[in-house]
Image (cartoon, helix red, strand yellow):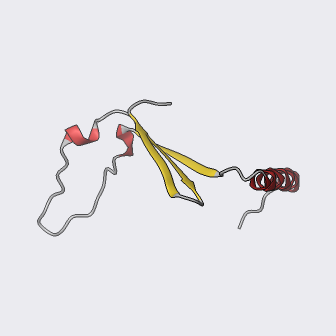
Amino acid sequence: MKYMPEAQMKTFQERCVIVYAQLRQVQYQQRRILYLDEICFTKLSFQGKEWSGKNTNLAVDQRDIYTGYHVAIAAISEEKGVDQIMIYSAAI
């Protein structure tokens, strides 16, 4: 198991303290906290190798693969669960 170098660990711990203080302040102000994540899909996201049963072939329509660039952004909150999902056909 690799460990984080001591200098990086110290910086990480300092940042954790700052973020935790900011979260406490936001909660005190009774503001809503959103947790957001994004993922990008390109034509290179296709899994080229896949399992198929004996004497069968896996067939994929190439039009379904080469669809360009897509981005999905999702936000969740404690109050609503999944708060919002947005999908874009270009980088944002």
Residue 61 image-quadrant placement: top left
Q: Determine whether, in the image, residue 15 is placed left or right of residue 46.
A: right
Q: Determine whether, in the image, residue 18 is placed left or right of residue 59.
A: right
Q: Is residue 61 above or below residue 30?
A: above
Q: Residue furthest left?
A: 55
Tell how many labels. 0
Is residue 21 or residue 15 the one in the foreground? 21
Q: Residue furthest front?
A: 30
Q: Residue at x 28, y 36 (%)?
A: 66
Q: Residue at x 29, y 35 (%)?
A: 67
Is residue 29 or residue 73 the one in the foreground? 29
Q: Determine whether, in the image, residue 78 is placed left or right of residue 64.
A: right
* Residue 46 in picture, x, y percent from top left: 34, 47
* Residue 92 in picture, x, y percent from top left: 50, 30
* Residue 77 in picture, x, y percent from top left: 58, 56
The quarter of the rendered structure image containing the N terminus is: bottom right
Q: Is residue 63 above or below residue 12?
A: above
* Residue 71 in picture, x, y percent from top left: 44, 39
Q: Residue at x 87, y 56 (%)?
A: 6
